[in-house]
Amino acid sequence: MSTTQLAGIASAFALVAYIPGALGAFIDNLSASLPGERRGRAHLTLLPPRPLSVAPQMAGELLSAALSAFSPFEVELTEIARFPLTDVLYIAVGNGGDQAHRAHAALNRGAFYYPEPFEYRPHVTLMVPQEKTDAGALQKAATAEWMQFNASKRFLVDRLDFLRQHPSGAWEKLREIHLAAAA
């Protein structure tokens, strides 16, 4: 079973911002070069996978309403890091992390509440390690590649994708939600 799937539920739901352009393509290629479980296209997760207590159509409407209070925001990706308990490699978020954290806190309630196994930390997952993986060596190699990327490491979060993961592991986009322009 994929580590993104939740045991005992028919499907999981998530809210993500895909990373566009050259930055997204670079991260996709970097992730593909690492051994371990792939996590799909490069993205920043605002709501990690979870079950829902309402129908997907209603959930999409509730998300759209809740996100109407949020303006687009810029995210800066900073460095390659590793979660100590899991050895998952990720790209840390600098500027924009506070807005992602606020959105997560505002959304992780009511129909979207889920007692997540780890505290929410805005990041971009690169690799979930396999057994006997030298995560330290992979982090060093990924850092060297990251340092070679000379284009902007910033992207605008102005739309989010509400996704459903099927038992097969495949993700389906249910709704695209655009963040309102600043007033």
Image: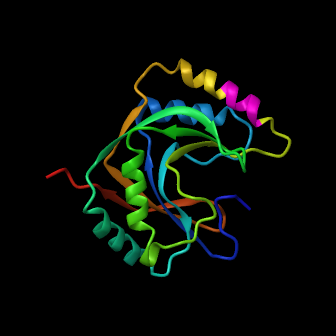
43 to 179, vertically: above or below = above
For the N terminus, which image quadrant? bottom right
Residue at x-position 36% and y-position 50%: 99
Question: Is 80 displayed left or right of 75 in the figure?
Answer: right
Question: Is 61 displayed left or right of 43 in the figure?
Answer: left
Count of numbered tags: 0
23 to 112, vertically: above or below = above
The foreground one among 180 and 120 is 120
Residue at x-position 44% and y-position 73%: 109
The foreground one among 72 and 101 is 101
Judged from this view, the residue extending furthest toward the left is: 183
Residue 167 picture quarter: bottom right
Region rendered in magenta: 135-141
172 to 156, vertically: above or below = below
- Residue 139 within the segment the image draws in magenta: yes
Residue 16 picture quarter: bottom left
- Residue 47: where, in percent of width, then height? 48, 61
Residue at x-position 59% and y-position 66%: 116
